[in-house]
Amino acid sequence: MAEREVLYKGLANVKTESRAAPGKLYLTSESIIHQPNEAFDDEIEIKLEEIARVSGKKTKFFGLEVLANLIEVELNDGTVYQFVVNRQKKWLGAISKLLKERLK
């Protein structure tokens, strides 16, 4: 990440249908990047121009929504990523601000 200016970062798991891969999430002026911990999946890089929608979701336990700690990112091609984060509102605010700036 040394070659890119990181605007926001934090620990995050990327959720798939079968498991969650722990790692770190970075927001740069161009991308959202998930770098997994060792022995997990490959890095995920989402270019801001590929994003169709970003929303906050709640983690469910036994069918009940209990924790507001998910960020769901849907791409223009329909691919959906879910990231489990701390400070969901700050993440959503930072991403939304960048997306609005890109529309100007």
Image (cartoon, grey):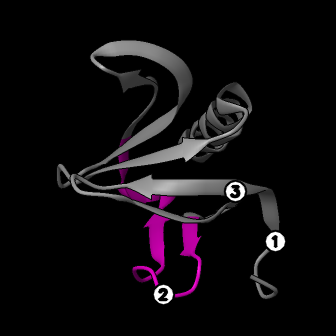
- Amino acid type shown at disc 2: Ala
Relative to 5, does residue 76 appear above or below in the rendering?
above
Distance of label 3 from label 2 (alpha carbons):
16 Å
Residue 8 appears at what percent x and percent y?
78, 53
Q: Which mark is residue 87?
A: none
Mark 3, secondary structure of its residue:
strand
**Does the stretch in magenta take in 40?**
yes
Q: Which mark is residue 11?
A: 3
Sequence-earlier tag: 3 or 1: 1
- Amino acid type shown at disc 3: Leu
Q: Nearer the observer, disc 2 or disc 1?
A: 2
Q: Which residue is mark 1?
A: 5
Q: From the image, which quarter does the N terminus lie in?
A: bottom right
Could you tell me which residue is drawn at 60 percent across and 34 percent down?
96
**Front residue of 69 and 64:** 64
Residue 94 appears at what percent x and percent y?
71, 39
Sequence-earlier tag: 3 or 2: 3
- Amino acid type shown at disc 1: Glu
Sequence-earlier tag: 2 or 1: 1
Q: Could you classify mark 2 by the number of other residues whose Cα lies within 10 Å: few (under 14), some (14-19), or many (20 or more)?
A: few
**Front residue of 33 and 62:** 62
Could you tell me which residue is drawn at 76 percent across and 78 percent down?
4
Q: Which residue is mark 2?
A: 39
Number of callouts: 3
Q: Could you classify mark 1 by the number of other residues whose Cα lies within 10 Å: few (under 14), some (14-19), or many (20 or more)?
A: few
* Residue span colored magenta: 33-52
Mark 2, secondary structure of its residue:
loop
Q: Nearer the observer, disc 3 or disc 2?
A: 2
Relative to 11, does residue 6 appear above or below in the rendering?
below
Distance of label 2 from label 1 (alpha carbons):
26 Å
Relative to 99, does residue 36 appear above or below in the rendering?
below
**Does the stretch in magenta take in 47?**
yes
